[in-house]
């Protein structure tokens, strides 16, 4: 069968690559055409129609400034899907774009599948009505999402979180010892602070300088930045502190060896927790976009997936004006307290239990195949 997949961000590329692998196990003749990135390319041996680097616009102001590009991409996607005539279109998160496209695909009478639900439980809950109308199969990855959709009389399939698969796969593939890792990247024996400033250029340029304000305060530690796969070295070099190491294509090994982490909100907060690394979640966006967002997002108290899933503050969040060198320094001091670390580790254990077992991508692939077979 022919599968058209649309992922618009780095996390979607990761989850899409795992899904492609599992679909191939069940459908050896599967053909893929997709919007995504390098991981989906590697999994499918097919280059993306559009790379997510061309698609990731964050914030209301940024979206408005790029409306012409967004609408051009939508128009292209519609023509490309119609011309390729897939057996199914699989949307991965990226709701602003994907939900606009879903109605068009539905009208073509092509099965529509959503893997990783839009965060309608956080804001724009009115989108549920569009989802019910245009999405044939919704695969959710967070335990509370299934309950949320039940309130709207919309059945979903809870498959678990694919990050458990990604981490398990990454750990299985890694043979590097701690010594090998440090030698490979020129790191000393000092404890490592992992800096994950996001995957978008605008996130990185805002977060990294503030994160690096800790470097000279803590000479007993060493700091290393996890380079985002979609960003070239030129994004980091003008910002990089002389004593900070840029690490490419080795984020999981970095987290495996890190003692602490500073993480821009997003999927990376959950990845960091699953590796058991005490963290501070940092976020600062365009002031106008943030102000609009705060007025629209009224249903949630947190921005990090760790705190959202646990429904309490497990990790400290420094948001907008609170994300500054002074506040960060104070919170980092608390993070180094052994009792505080012990508490975080206990919470992380409960978090992992809530997420269930690995195998989300396999369960998602099986659900997709069953759905497509039932609609033939």
Image (cartoon, grey):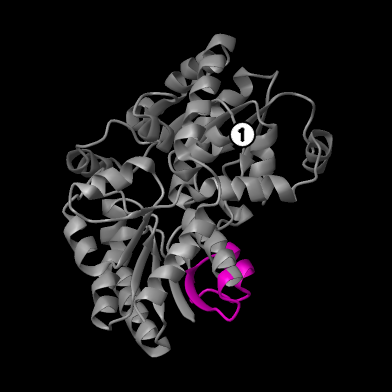
Across and down, in percent, residue 185 comes to: 77, 41
Instruction: From the viewer's side, name the closer residue of 137 and 163.
Output: 137
Question: Which image quadrant for residue 218?
Answer: top right
Residue 66 appearing in the image: no
Across and down, in percent, residue 137 comes to: 33, 64
For the residue labelled by badge 1, is the local secondary structure a helix, a strand or a loop? strand
User: Quick check: 149 above or below 354?
Assistant: below
Classify residue 127 as left or right of residue 346: left
The quadrant the C terminus occupies is bottom left
Question: Which image quadrant for residue 89?
Answer: bottom left
| Label 1 environment density (alpha carbons within 10 Å; few <14, some 14–19, many ≥20) | many
**What residue lies at 30% left-to-right and 79% top-to-bottom?**
75
Question: Is-magenta flag for residue 122?
Answer: no
Q: Which residues are magenta?
A: 26-50
Across and down, in percent, residue 345 comes to: 55, 22
Residue 210 appearing in the image: yes
Across and down, in percent, residue 365 comes to: 49, 64
Instruction: From the viewer's side, name the closer residue of 145 and 49.
Output: 145
Q: Label 1 belongs to which residue?
A: 194
Classify residue 298 as left or right of residue 85: left
View extreme (bottom): residue: 83
Question: Which image quadrant for residue 305?
Answer: top left
Instruction: From the viewer's side, name the closer residue of 242 and 74.
Output: 74
User: Quick check: 143 above or below 76?
Assistant: above
User: Quick check: 237 above or below 333?
Assistant: below
Instruction: From the viewer's side, name the closer residue of 319 and 2.
Output: 2
**What residue lies at 49% left-to-right and 33% top-to-bottom?**
353
User: Quick check: 49 above or below 339?
Assistant: below
């Amino acid at each position: 069968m022919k599968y058209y997949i649309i992922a618009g961000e780095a996390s979607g590329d990761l989850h899409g690559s795992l899904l492609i692998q599992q679909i191939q196990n069940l459908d050896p003749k599967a053909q893929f055409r997709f919007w995504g990135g390098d991981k989906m390319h590697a999994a499918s041996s097919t280059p993306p129609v559009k790379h997510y680097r061309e698609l990731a616009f964050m914030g209301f102001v940024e979206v408005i400034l790029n409306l012409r590009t967004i609408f051009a991409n939508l128009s292209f996607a519609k023509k490309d899907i119609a011309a390729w005539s897939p057996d199914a279109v699989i949307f991965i998160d990226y709701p602003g774009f994907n939900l606009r496209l879903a109605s068009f695909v539905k009208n073509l009478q092509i099965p529509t599948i959503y893997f990783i639900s839009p965060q309608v439980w956080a804001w724009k809950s009115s989108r549920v009505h569009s989802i019910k109308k245009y999405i044939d199969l919704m695969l959710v990855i967070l335990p509370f999402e299934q309950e949320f959709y039940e309130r709207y009389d919309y059945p979903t399939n809870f498959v678990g979180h694919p990050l458990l698969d990604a981490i398990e796969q990454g750990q299985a593939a890694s043979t590097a010892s701690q010594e090998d890792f440090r030698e490979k990247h020129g790191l000393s024996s000092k404890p490592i602070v992992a800096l994950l400033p996001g995957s978008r250029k605008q996130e990185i340029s805002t977060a990294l300088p503030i994160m690096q304000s800790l470097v000279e305060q803590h000479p007993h530690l060493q700091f290393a930045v996890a380079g985002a796969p979609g960003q070239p070295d030129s994004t980091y070099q003008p910002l990089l502190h002389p004593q900070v190491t840029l690490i490419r294509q080795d984020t999981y090994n970095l987290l495996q060896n890190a003692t602490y982490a500073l993480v821009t909100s997003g999927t990376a907060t959950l990845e960091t927790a699953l590796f058991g690394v005490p963290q501070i979640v940092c976020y600062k966006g365009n002031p106008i976009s943030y102000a609009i967002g705060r007025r629209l997002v009224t249903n949630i108290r947190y921005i990090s997936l760790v705190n959202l899933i646990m429904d309490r503050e497990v990790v400290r969040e420094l948001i907008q004006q609170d994300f500054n060198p002074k506040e960060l320094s104070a919170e980092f001091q608390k993070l180094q307290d052994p009792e505080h670390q012990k508490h975080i580790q206990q919470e992380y254990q409960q978090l992992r239990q809530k997420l269930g077992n690995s195998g989300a991508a396999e369960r998602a692939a099986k659900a997709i195949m069953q759905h497509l077979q039932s609609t033939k």
